[in-house]
Image (cartoon, grey):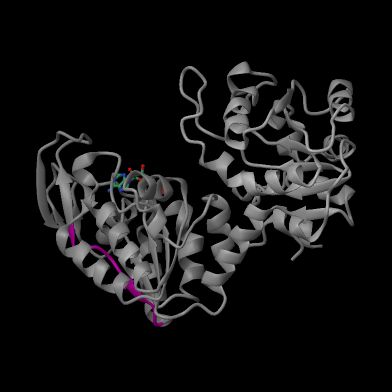
Amino acid sequence: MKNINDICTRGKKVIIRVDFNVPLDKNFNVTDNSRIVAALPTINKVAKEGGKVILISHLGRPKNGFDDKLSLHHVVSSLSILLNKKVSFCRDCIGDTTTKDVDDMENGDILVLENLRFYKEETQGDFVFAKKLSDLADIYVNDAFGTAHRSHASTAIIANFFPKNKFFGLLLYKELENLKRALENPKRPFTAIIGGAKISGKIDVIQSLFNKVDNLIIGGGMAYTFAKAIGGSIGKSLVEDDKLDLARKLIAESQEKGVNLILPIDSVNANRFNNDAKIIKSNISNINQEHMGLDIGAKSIEKFSEIILKSKTIVWNGPMGVFEMKNFQAGTKLVGKAICRATKNGAFSLVGGGDSVSAVNQFKFSKDITYLSTGGGAMLEFLEGKKLPGVEAILD
Ligand code: AMP
């Protein structure tokens, strides 16, 4: 796999697809700059050797063309501070103004172009739009893992115009290396922990993990659908009634494949979806009609931790409960802690998905996890064994 370290970009115009889709507060300050930080190695490598850095990204989901609230000029000062270097901004991403701004660049300059999604052609994967972007540069680099599962103009189509000059950025390269490390010849036991709100978005990943893992732990809201599917009473807990058969099928499939599927034993229940709600703990299959399960209970945490501590490869996606509320965060926090301990004992751990990564950051576990992935959807699709268009476009 070719990455940007394989060439010298001095004097060349390098268009880099980054993921600057960062959260902004009401004054348009960047509240979490981790995606910008993750893109720095590639930007620095090109700028320091005298390449001209042209950065392209999306920000949010603009509905109807230009929207100042979603302009990428909001990220320029954060980037400039992190790089300790002047960063210029262009009010468009294609057209005459953009061409002129690019032509005016000196070696080592950094220019951020306006939000790609102000043009609907970006998400449509439009060929002409991709060609216009490609005309700005000599070299194309994809460093946006978060959008690598999308076949958009800037993530996949554009690569067609750089048959010999397309490269992985250092972040995207590192993401792929770490995901491959988990999936190709993993050290065993291999344990996956899948949580989050619903089964629906994670069926494919659960099924494909059955072919790879030794243990599959299920937590979070989706666990209650499993509990109901096997005859439990789950009160007002989150449930997908149209997925009960599927849950039973997944349980049967795990048995056929010899995978140890581990469901929570107990649950922390509340009478309202609120941190101050009255709490009652019970077996997960015995929640009374007035309550909903918002976290896994102590026995589940103990059982999950025991399995995690014996594992040598661990993949985690999705929280164990409503960790955003203090009274329902113990499951996510203690499962995270067990992963950190296993990692200290030599296991390889990979955590991905927006909510799991925020939980890891919130509990300050990031330094004790082997690799924190920047892509939620892209990581799931990779684990499902799907080909990511943004990756394939560079490989072919
Ligand atoms: P996902 O995007 O599918 O990974 O889901 C993440 C969300 O699931 C988080 O916002 C959690 O608060 C939520 N969640 C986790 N456990 C539960 C639960 N038992 N009931 C309701 N929501 C939950």
Q: In which quarter of the image is residue 163?
A: bottom right
Residue 14 covered by magenta stretch: no
Image point (78%, 47%), residue name: 49
- Identify the image quadrant of the N terminus: bottom right
Left or right, 106 with reference to 337: right
How many numbered callouts? Answer: 0
- Residue 226, position in %: x, y? 30, 61
Q: In which quarter of the image is residue 214?
A: bottom left
Decide if residue 335 is in sight here. Answer: yes
Q: In this view, does 232 lie above or below 89?
A: below
Q: In this view, does 293 lie above or below 22?
A: below
Residue 265 covered by magenta stretch: yes
Left or right, 125 with reference to 79: right
- Residue 66, position in %: x, y? 69, 19
Q: Which of 343 and 50 is in front in this view?
A: 50
Decide if residue 384 is in sight here. Answer: no
Left or right, 98 with reference to 371: right
Image point (53%, 57%), residue name: 380
Q: Is residue 252 above or below residue 352?
A: below
Q: Which of 287 and 261 is in front in this view?
A: 261
Image point (34%, 51%), residue name: 241
- Identify the image quadrant of the C terminus: bottom right
- Residue 321, position in %: x, y? 28, 49
Q: Nearer the viewer, residue 85 or 279?
A: 85
Q: Give the range drawn in magenta.
A: 258-266
- Residue 155, position in %: x, y? 73, 46
